Image (cartoon, grey):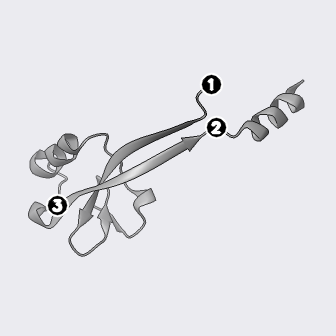
Amino acid sequence: MKTRDERIRYVIRHKDGYFIDVAGNQTFDFMKVTKWSDEESLYDFLNHNSYAPPSTKDYSAQQVRITYELMEDDASEHISKIN
């Protein structure tokens, strides 16, 4: 059984280091912003969406690695509590 998986996602990052979400809100916490599954979708948003920031050349795609890991011990505890 597979117990670990990694995914690459993309976030919008300004050249000054902060990130933005699809509403244009700025934050330095990348966990709070929209994660895109591919760069093409992110750049489509930046170049063609009415909610995109005005100076899109100041923004780029920043890669984020997301790791999912099945926690075996926690699962067995939950199952024993159910039974």
Residue at point 86% right, 27% down? 82
- The quadrant the C terminus occupies is top right
Q: CA distance from mark 1 to mark 3?
A: 44 Å
Q: Position of residue 45 (x, y in %)?
A: 18, 46
**Which of the numbered marks, if any, corresponds to residue 70?**
2
Q: Earlier in the sequence, mark 1 or mark 2?
A: 1
The one of 35 and 53 positioned closer to us in this rendering: 35
Give the side of residue 4 with respect to residue 57, left or right. Answer: right
Q: Quadrant of residue 79?
A: top right
Q: CA distance from mark 1 to mark 2?
A: 10 Å
Q: Position of residue 15 (x, y in %)?
A: 20, 71
Q: CA distance from mark 3 to mark 2?
A: 38 Å
Residue at point 40% right, 61% down? 30
Give the side of residue 3 with respect to residue 10, left or right. Answer: right
Label 1 with label 3: CB-CB less than 8 Å:
no
Q: In this figure, which residue is indicated by the disc labeled 3?
A: 53
SS for callout 2: loop
- The quadrant the N terminus occupies is top right
SS for callout 1: loop
Badge 3 crowding class, 10 Å Cα cut-off, few under 14, some 14 to 19, many 20 or more, is some
Q: Amino acid at mark 3?
A: Pro
